[in-house]
Image (cartoon, rainbow, N blue to C red):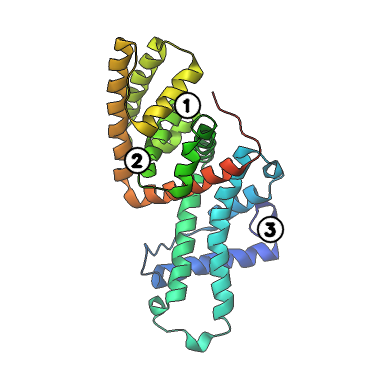
Amino acid sequence: ESACRGARNTVRRAALERLVLQVAALNGCANGCSKGRGDLGIQVLEAAADLFLSEDIQQPTDNNKVRETLANAVLEGFLKLRQYLHKASRKMLYIDPQLSNNSDLARSLVAWEEAWELGNDFLVQPDLREAFCGISVEAAAIQEFKPQFAKLVEDQDAELFLILPRLVLLSGLWESSHCALARNFGMEGWQWEALSEEFLKLCLIFPGNQLEFWKLLVAKALHGPGDCDDQEFSRSLEKFLLQLEGLSMQLQRSEPQRWNRCCQLLLRSIGAALAAPVRVLSL
């Protein structure tokens, strides 16, 4: 509660802000296992606390489960660090003056830095947060017509990590508010416009309804190209899939470490949405 927006200008909040500043400085000199960032400000912790304590998130919907997962990812990282500091305060004589040599401290700082970066990427910015939540919910809804997808998420086979970037792109094309996530990973505007153009062409010539079209695209993302009775559509679909695959590889390679962390959080969020009692296929 001390971290939330409503606690600003209180004594507890002032103490927390000092702690966060000191942790950032500590991270800069003692975290030799990661980036050692010194700019880990309180804004990410505040955003996570506000989301976690909001009344809306108490409703058991898919979106709220994903939002709660995002908030927890940040809060858990900070809690691990707080727990270490509490334990270390009783054993100061055993702490190596060369701070980077303290393995427990290093692990706690790495956990907080990674949690902070996730929050800074996908929680603080509203458009990215909503895109992330929307994609997670849409991906979870796939198991309604592709039950094996839930098993893929549970097992986390290597194949899944080729499928995820395709789903991120498809979701961004299907729902314009979801495209912010894909475009946040080094994609140029003209690349997205070219992919969108091919997608719209497919929409116009597809010989079926919207739900059938979405199911076909998901099937291609999961299993790869297949046969289609309409030859013109087959040629356009193949061209689109090749373009989609090229951009999905770009997503993975532009910032590999950041993308891997994104995937980990995405899978955690999809798992939370799969467990939610209310699920609606977004069309």
Which is more N-terminal, label 3 or label 1?
3
- Residue at x 47%, y 19% (from the top left corner): 212
Structural crowding at the residue carrying mark 3, measured as other residues with C-alpha within 10 Å and reported as few (<14), some (14–19) or many (≥20):
few
What's the CA distance linking mark 2 and mark 3?
39 Å
Across and down, in percent, residue 14 comes to 64, 64
Q: Does 14 sit above or below residue 187?
A: below
- Would you name the residue on which mark 3 appears? 1
| Circle 1/circle 3 CB separation < 8 Å | no
| Circle 2/circle 3 CB separation < 8 Å | no
Across and down, in percent, residue 98 comes to 39, 81
Locate the N terminus by quadrant. Answer: bottom right
Across and down, in percent, residue 257 comes to 35, 52
Q: Does 141 sit above or below residue 260?
A: above
- Would you name the residue on which mark 1 appears? 176
Q: Amino acid at mark 1?
A: Ser
Q: Nearer the viewer, mark 1 or mark 3?
A: 1
Callout 2 secondary element: helix
Residue 252 shows up from this direction: yes
Q: Amino acid at mark 3?
A: Glu
- Residue at x 49%, y 62% (from the top left corner): 112
